[in-house]
Image (cartoon, rainbow, N blue to C red):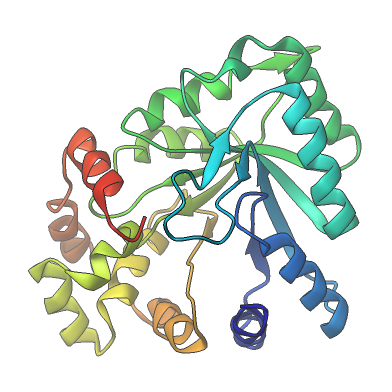
Amino acid sequence: MREATYAVLDAAYAAGVRWVDVARSYGRAEEFLAGWMAERGHNDLTVSSKWGYTYVGGWRMDATMHEVKEHSAGVFSRQWTESRSLLGSSISLYQVHSLTADSPLFTDEALQRALAALSDDGVRVGFSTSGPAQGDTIRRAFELEVAGRPVFSAVQSTWNVLEPSAGPALAEAHAAGNVVLVKETLANGRLVVDPPAAITRLAHRFGVGADAIAVAAVLAQPWADTVLVGPSSPQQLTANLAATTVDLPRAELAALAALAEEPERYWARRSSLQWQ
């Protein structure tokens, strides 16, 4: 797994990718990234990580539970220490993992103060979102303040042609000067495994894979500052990055917009995916 990770990171760096996003609950992702950076001597990367989930799966596919979510000051303190011990000062952005409207973070003032304190050390504070109410969570989170200053200045949300509902809130966040990262650009694989006819048609037209068309649709959004992909091999990375050669016309973007599903339906389908 380490060798596979290094191979993807080497290919990404050679292709000009300079942002790497990890999380405490992504198995040994932080450890692998730290080792790769140390071995290669790369110091020009933007590194973002997340806290809030603890991986407990023990590398077993049949584990009854793979990760435990807890947004508390204690978990934040522990995981920030763990992230910092591995990645040191290379962490530019630290995010609350999968913030939702029912998170205790919204009423935990001690946790809010602890998060805000990261900004004093030059670390940007953000959050990621999931679920059908992403827009509401985004707007509510950016309203949080400590001592008259916003707690958050970055957001990482799901947006793809099947689930674009967070778009207006992300546009507002970008316009207010916050950094917007987009995740799940391939709808957790759905847009590659079973792409809609409209995407397949465009893929043939531009001579790329369905994944490149899906990513190109995200790159076309003016509020998307950083667009994330999650390839598991250099070959997948190359296919994903072909999106940078695709300039989708306005009419084609409108056609892709027609693929949007109801958020509740999309997220229910996402939960049922076997590879999740």
Residue appearing at x 39%, y 29% in the figure: 135
| Direction left: furthest residue | 197
The one of 48 and 35 positioned closer to us in this rendering: 35
Residue appearing at x 91%, y 39% in the figure: 121
- State left or right for residue 134 relative to residue 213: right
Q: Quadrant of the C terminus?
A: bottom left
Residue 220: image location, x then y, percent: 37, 61
Residue 190: image location, x then y, percent: 25, 63
- Residue 221, picture quadrant: bottom left
Residue 157: image location, x then y, percent: 46, 44
- State left or right for residue 249 relative to residue 93: left
Is residue 177 visible to us here? yes
- Residue 22, picture quadrant: bottom right
The correct choice, above or below, for 206 with respect to 131 in the image is: below
- State left or right for residue 208 relative to residue 27: left
The one of 163 and 222 positioned closer to us in this rendering: 163
Q: Quadrant of the N terminus?
A: bottom right
Is residue 163 visible to us here? no
Residue 147: image location, x then y, percent: 81, 12
Q: How many marks?
A: 0
The correct choice, above or below, for 11 with respect to 53 in the image is: below
Residue appearing at x 48%, y 68% in the figure: 230
The one of 46 and 6 positioned closer to us in this rendering: 6
Residue appearing at x 74%, y 19% in the figure: 111
- State left or right for residue 94 relative to residue 249: right
- Residue 105, picture quadrant: top right
The correct choice, above or below, for 36 with respect to 24 in the image is: below
